[in-house]
Amino acid sequence: MGFERKMYDVSSMNLKCAQCSKAITELPFQPDGSRPVYCQECNRGRARSGGFRSGGYNRGGYRGR
């Protein structure tokens, strides 16, 4: 019982992964430029290593609320 997540074409923004510099052409959200973006592979690795809680966006005062 899965669902399809809306993907945004961001190829015109010339985004690169903040970790590996791979070109990013599609994201499940519309980026606003205030935070780094990661390719699918690096994002998976960050989630497995706890990157969202032990570094990632929590640095610099973002509390996830």
Image: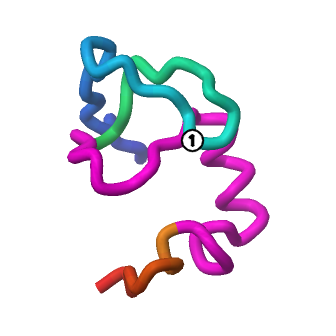
Query: Magenta stretch: residue 20 in it?
Result: no
The image shows residue 29 at horizontal and vertical percentages of 28, 43
Q: Residue at x 66, y 41 (%)?
A: 19
- Give the residues in magenta: 30-56
Query: The disc labelled 1 sits on which kind of residue?
Result: Ala
Q: Is residue 55 left or right of residue 63?
A: right
Q: Nearer the viewer, residue 12 or 5?
A: 12
Q: Nearer the viewer, residue 12 or 28?
A: 12
Mark 1, other Cα within 10 Å: few <14 / some 14–19 / many ≥20: some
Vertical relation: 61 (above or below) 3:
below
Q: Coloured how? A: rainbow
The image shows residue 59 at horizontal and vertical percentages of 52, 78
Q: Nearer the viewer, residue 1 or 22?
A: 22
Q: Is residue 2 left or right of residue 22?
A: left
Vertical relation: 17 (above or below) 23:
below
How would you classify the magenta stretch by its main secondary structure?
Answer: loop
The secondary structure type at the circle numbered 1 is: loop
Vertical relation: 33 (above or below) 58:
above
Query: Magenta stretch: residue 55 in it?
Result: yes
> Number of labelled discs?
1
Q: Residue at x 47, y 23 (%)?
A: 24
Residue indicated by mark 1? 18
